[in-house]
């Protein structure tokens, strides 16, 4: 059975929304009698979805960016990233103290 994947493409300067290509793999070609009818069908899908391109393959195509990491139980892995604001806070405080000392010494900058 055919699969469909979305391949995100780099944005251009005039793009209103991020461009993408549809990647359809595991396709058996036993469709319409003429090759041009078959191509016209994919062109219609491209136009109706707003895709930049439709790539059709008989083989299985894996897009690494679409892989979802899973935990040992097979569920999607969720990663939470938290900033270390303690060090940031200390850096800001040091800069404030330096600026205040420069102002008191009459030499700012």
Image: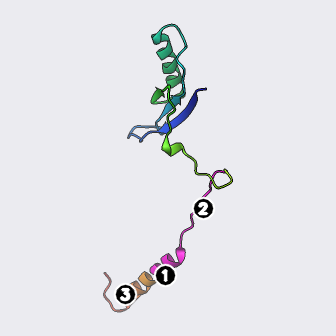
The numbered mark at residue 90 is: 1
Tell me which residue sits at (45%, 11%) in the image: 36
Count of numbered tags: 3
Q: Is residue 34 magenta?
A: no
User: Which residue bears the numbered disc 3?
Assistant: 103
Side of 103 where 56 appears, left or right: right
First-in-chain label (2 vs 3): 2
Tell me which residue sits at (53%, 74%) in the image: 85
Tell me which residue sits at (48%, 20%) in the image: 43
For the record, the magenta segment spans 75-92
- CB under 8 Å between discs 1 and 3: no
Q: Quadrant of residue 49?
A: top right
Q: Residue furthest top?
A: 33
Quarter of the picture containing the N terminus is top right
Side of 14 where 3 appears, left or right: right
Side of 105 where 43 appears, left or right: right
User: Which residue bears the numbered disc 2?
Assistant: 80
| Residue 8 image position (x, y, % from top left) | 48, 40
The answer, for residue 17, to whether it is visible in the render is: no
């Amino acid at each position: 059975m055919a699969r469909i994947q979305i391949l995100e493409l780099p944005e251009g300067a005039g793009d209103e929304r991020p461009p993408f290509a549809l990647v359809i793999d595991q396709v058996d070609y036993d469709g319409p009698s003429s090759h041009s009818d078959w191509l016209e069908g994919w062109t219609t899908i491209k136009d109706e979805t707003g895709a930049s391109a439709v790539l059709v393959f008989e083989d299985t195509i894996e897009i690494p960016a679409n892989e979802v990491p899973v935990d040992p139980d097979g569920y999607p892995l969720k990663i939470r990233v938290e900033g270390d604001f303690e060090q940031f806070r200390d850096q800001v405080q040091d800069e404030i103290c330096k600026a205040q000392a420069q102002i008191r010494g009459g030499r700012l900058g």
